[in-house]
Amino acid sequence: MNIKQLLLVFFGATVLAACSKLEEKYRGSVEAVAQGGVNVGDVLQGAYNALNNPFQDQSRFWAASQHTTDETIGPTRGPDWDDNGVWRVLHSHNWDADHLFLRDTYRELLQAQYAASNVLALNPSAQQAAEAKFIRAISMWCILDGWDQVPYRKDLDKVTVLPEVLKGKAAFDFILKDLTEALPNLGTSSKIKANKDAARSLMMKLYLNKGVYAGSRKTPSFDAADMNQVIALADQIIAGGYSLETNYFDAFAADNSSKSKEMIYALENTNGLRGGNNQSRWYCTLHYNQRPSGWNGFTTVAETYDRFQAGDKRLTADYAGVTNVSGLKAGLLIGQQFDQTGAALKDRKNNNLAYTKAVKLKETGNDLEITGIRVIKYTPDYPREGQQAENEYVIFRLADVLLMKAEALVRTGKAAEGLVIVNQIRTNRGATPFASLTLDNLLDERSRELYWEGWRRNDLIRFGKFLGTWTEKSASGDERLLFAIPSEQLAVNPNLTQNPGY
C-alpha cells in the first residue's frame, strides 16, 4: 500500500472538519489496511453504513427534520425524557450551537461524505464511483438543507489544509454535478443500493428546493425551468414500473424489501449482517406495557391527526403479523389500546392505556404516561423482536415522487394536471378526492402521506409555514430557517461562520 492510500483510510476515521485525533475504535482497521491493502467494495460498503446512524437513529437527522415541526413532539414525562431539554428546544425552536443531537448529526453527515470521497480516491469501478457520488450527494444535501454551510475537502491527502465551505448555490451546484455524473453508471436492480431512480429522486428534491437553497429561505421563488426539471425527472421514475401499495403500510413492513411496490431507495437492515436503529421508530413512541415494550416518548400532535378524514387507510389499520400478534395497530394510535386477546391495556399507574390528543412539552400529573397520539409507521418485526429489525429504512418512494410532480405542476400553473395525480393517491388511500388542488391542501396531503418520514421540515420551509404556530410552539424568528453551526465545528474550521441570529 502507498502512503496516500494509508492516509486516506487513516484520516477518513476523523471528523471531516479538521480534527486530528484518531478515535480508538478505528486503529485496528487502519493497521489491517496498512498490512493487507484496500478492498474498494468494502470501503464502499463502509460509506453506505455511514448513512445508517444519521438517518435511522431517532436523535439525528430525523429528529432535526421532525421534532422541529407540527408532526412530532417529545414530551418530558415527569422524570422521563428530560435529557436536559434537547427535545423541548427542538420543538419550540430554541436550539443553540451546542445542541447535542444537532452537533452529532452534522458531524456524522460529514463523516458519511468523507467515507464516500474516500471511495473515489481508491480507483473504483465506474459503478462504484457512481454509488459513492450518490452517497456523498445525499449526505451533503442534508447539510445544505439544515445548515447551508457544507465543508468539503477536495484533496483528501492534504490533511493539513482546512476544508473549503460550500454555501447556497455553490453547494447546490456541487451536489447536482455529483448526481448528474453518477446517473449514467448507476444500476437499476437494487433498491438498497444507489440506483438511477434514487439519484433522480434526490435531483427532484434539489430542483424543487432550489429557490430555498440558492435564493431566499424566507420567501423562496420557483423558476418554471426548475419545476419542469422536477416533472421530467418524475416521469422517468414513474416509467420504472412502480405502483402505489394496495396496503399502505406494506411500504414500511419487516418484509418491505420484497413486498413494497413503491420503494425506490432504502437503507438496508438485515439481521446478523448490517443495519441501523430502525426499530427506534416504534420503540420511541410505544408505552412500556405494549409489545414490544417501548420507551413511552414521542407522539404526534392534534394538527397532524386532524388532517385526516375517517376511512383514510393511512390513519390507522389492523396489520397482519402485528395486530394479531400484539394487538398493536399501524398508523396513529389514539384512545384505548388493547393486546391481541382484546384485553384493555393499563399504564404503570394502573390507568387505562388510552392515548389522548392533548399533549404538552412538560407533562405532570397522573395521566402523564398516556398523553399524545402515538405513531406506528414502521410495523414491528416480531420474528426478530429484540434483534436487528429487517424493515428497510425508506428514503425515496413513489408517492413522494408523485406529490413532488404535482407540486411542480401547481407552481407552473397546471393545477388541474396535479389534481389528477393527487386524487390518484387519495383514491388509493381511501380518501375523498379533492375538487381542486392548491398549495395549502397539497402541503396537507404531503403530511397525510409522508408523516414521520423525515420530510416535514423541508416541506414547511418550502411552503413558507415553518415559522408559524402549532401545539406547544409559538411563532419563531427567521434565523430558525437554519440550524446553528455547531460550536465544535467552528472551533476546528475557521472557514465556517456562524449562521445569522445565533
Image (cartoon, grey):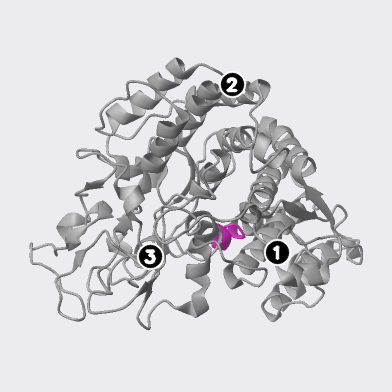
In this rendering, the answer to whether 194 lies above or below 139 is: above
Crowding around mark 3 (Cα neighbors within 10 Å: few <14, some 14 to 19, many 20+) is: many
What are the residue bounds of the magenta stretch? 49-55
Magenta span includes 54 = yes
* Amino acid type, mark 1: Tyr
Magenta span includes 119 = no
Residue 502 numbered mark, or none: 1
Q: Secondary structure at mark 1?
A: loop
Residue on which disc 3 sits = 298
Q: Quadrant of residue 168?
A: top right
* Amino acid type, mark 3: Phe
Of marks 2 and 1, which one's residue comes earlier in the chain?
2
Residue 303, image x and y in percent? 35, 49
Quarter of the figure that contains the N terminus: bottom right
Q: Most prominent secondary structure in the magenta stretch?
A: helix
Mark pair 2, 1: CA separation:
39 Å
Residue 236, image x and y in percent? 55, 23
Question: Camera-side residue: 494 or 382?
Answer: 494
Residue 81, image x and y in percent? 41, 76
Of circles 2 and 1, the one toward us is 1
Q: Secondary structure at mark 2?
A: helix
Quarter of the figure that contains the C terminus: bottom right
Question: Camera-side residue: 7 or 318?
Answer: 318
Residue on which disc 2 sits = 232
Q: Quadrant of residue 347?
A: bottom left
Mark pair 2, 3: CA separation:
38 Å
